[in-house]
Amino acid sequence: MWRAYANLDALPPQYNHLVVNHGVTFVDRQIGAHTQSVESKNGQLKEFVRRKYGIHDEPFTSHLREFAWRERFGDRNNVFYHLWSQISMFYPCIQ
C-alpha cells in the first residue's frame, strides 16, 4: 500500500476516498473519480500564497487557513459580516 494511504481508516465516515489508476485513465468513468479538482485547488492555493506573501518560511498552516476562509467567505461586500459571524461562533456572548 502507498504510504499516503496508511491512515485512511482514521478519516471521518463521511469522507469518501476514490482511487484512479493513471496508468489506465485520468478519470474513472464508472465512479467519476479524478484528481483535477484537487490539483486545481492546490494550484490556486500556491498562487494565493505566492501573490500575497511571496516566498517565506512562515507557517504554511496560517496561509492555508486564510485561503480556505477566503474561499468560503470571499464575497468582498460581506467580509466584515462574515468575520463577525465567525468570531461569534467561536466566542458566543454570555447572557
Image (spheres, helix red, strand yellow):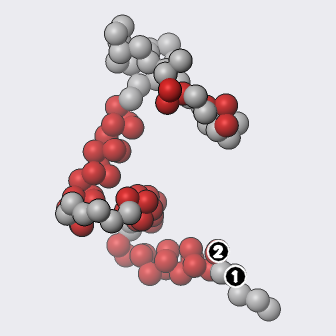
User: Marks 2 and 1, Cα distance to the nearest angstrom?
Assistant: 6 Å
Q: Is residue 11 left or right of residue 37?
A: right
Seen in the picture, residue 55 relative to 14 is either above or below; the reply is: below
Question: Where on the picture, by quarter, is residue 12?
Answer: top right
Q: Residue at x 23, y 53 (%)?
A: 47
Q: Is residue 49 left or right of residue 71?
A: left
Q: Secondary structure at mark 1?
A: loop
Q: Using the image as rendered, state which of residue 40 and residue 73 is in the foreground.
A: 40
Q: Residue at x 61, y 31 (%)?
A: 8
Q: Using the image as rendered, state which of residue 36 and residue 23 is in the foreground.
A: 23
Q: Would you say residue 28 is visible in this rendering? A: yes
Kind of residue sitting beneath label 2:
Met
Q: Residue at x 35, y 15 (%)?
A: 22
Question: Where on the picture, by quarter, is residue 38?
Answer: top left
Q: Using the image as rendered, state which of residue 48 and residue 62 is in the foreground.
A: 62
Q: Mark 1 Cα within 10 Å, few/some/many (few <14, many 20+)? A: few
Q: Is residue 6 left or right of residue 40?
A: right
Seen in the picture, residue 84 relative to 64 is either above or below; the reply is: below
Q: Which residue is mark 1?
A: 92
Image quadrant in which the C terminus is located: bottom right
Q: Position of residue 94 (x, y in %)?
A: 76, 89
Q: Position of residue 50 (x, y in %)?
A: 22, 58
Q: Would you say residue 67 is visible in this rendering? A: no
Residues at circles 2 and 1 in contact by the CB criterion of under 8 Å = yes
Seen in the picture, residue 21 relative to 16 is either above or below; the reply is: above
Q: Residue at x 64, y 38 (%)?
A: 11
Q: Secondary structure at mark 2?
A: helix
Kind of residue sitting beneath label 1:
Pro
Q: Which residue is mark 2?
A: 89
